[in-house]
Amino acid sequence: MAGPTKKPRKPAEPQSDDESMSDESESGTYHGQQEVEATFEGRNPEGQDFHGIKQLLLQLFLKAHVDLSQMAEMLIAQFGVGSVLKQSCEDSDDEDDMDLSDESNVFGITSVINLSSHKETLCVKQFYALLDELIKQHADNNMQSDILQILQSNKIGFLINERFVNIPAKISAVMLNSLLDELNRIKKKDNSYDFDYYVLICKTSKPKENNAVEELYSNDEEEIFRKAADATFDFSVEKEADVGLAGKWLSEDKQMIPYRRIIFFKGSKLNTIVNEISSLVQ
């Protein structure tokens, strides 16, 4: 990023120990959550962020056969494109807060991989092979034709918009606007970043009893990307996800099945999408 950009999380009153204890039933089921106040900032990815970035990529790809170590290294190596979300330590007054803001902790990443310029890189080859397999298995015939046409004759960017659960969507406006500025700068020097299309992987979930309704996005703002999509398809990752991701977290909740949604949208739409997200979350 051009410089550190901060966006605070919504502060919440901390619970006392008694309140926290009351949130657990005798069966051990957790019925509530404790919120803490934290301030985040975007920074350029660095070598120390490798494991944090890889872990965030793992949330998207789960057990898919893609070299996420190499992909994380690619994201770090891109100078001036993309940001990682970290906790600011400026407001930390005690050692506990300093521990939480360890510089190696990565809470989110917003970046893009130039797929067209790295077609011979192993992880990109694996990513294309994964897309090809998923398209054949989960997209209908008309959608398959549209997506294959997009992939064969255009400059494609893999947009990554990933963060930990419960970090508010408001932070996405800052990170995406920063990425938009960076892309506008770099494509003046390198035309390969003037993408015709982007591909985005979204994490969604649907109730087990009725998959056609009550769809949830892990990152709320990604519904705006879906509305702007030129092609999209879904697939369940129930068998690949951890039990906790698909489990029944709260006693009153419905059991949710985790899905992934693959979205393709024109590069010319990114500016409008980011502006709409900024208006929605701020």
Image: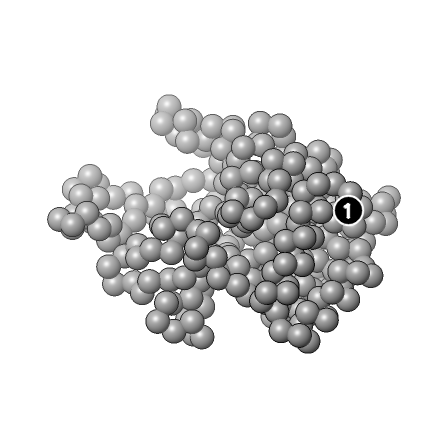
In this view of the protein, can residue 221 be seen by the observer?
no
Q: Position of residue 211 (x, y in %)?
A: 42, 71
* Quadrant showing the N terminus: top right
In this view of the protein, can residue 39 be seen by the observer?
yes
- For image coordinates 74% across by 65% down, the residue present is 148
Q: Residue 33 vs residue 6: left or right?
A: left
**Label 1: few (<14), some (14–19) or many (≥20) C-alpha neighbours in 10 Å:** some
- For image coordinates 53% across by 59% down, the residue present is 260
Choose top left, top right, bottom left or bottom right for residue 276. Answer: bottom right
Q: Is residue 177 above or below residue 148?
A: above
Q: Position of residue 70 (x, y in %)?
A: 65, 36
Extreme top residue here? 95
Q: Is residue 238 above or below residue 8?
A: below
- For image coordinates 67% across by 42% down, the residue present is 123
> How many marks on residues?
1
In the image, 66 versus 182, the foreground residue is 66
Residue corresponding to mark 1: 119
Q: Is residue 277 above or below residue 165?
A: below
Q: Position of residue 253 (x, y in %)?
A: 29, 63
Of the residues shown, which amino acid type is indicated by label 1?
Answer: Lys
Q: Position of residue 230 (x, y in %)?
A: 69, 70
In the image, 134 versus 232, the foreground residue is 134
Judged from the image, the secondary structure of the residue bearing numbered disc 1 is: loop
In the image, 206 versus 121, the foreground residue is 121
In the image, 216 versus 282, the foreground residue is 216
Choose top left, top right, bottom left or bottom right for residue 226. Answer: bottom right
- For image coordinates 30% across by 45% down, the residue present is 34
Colouring: one colour
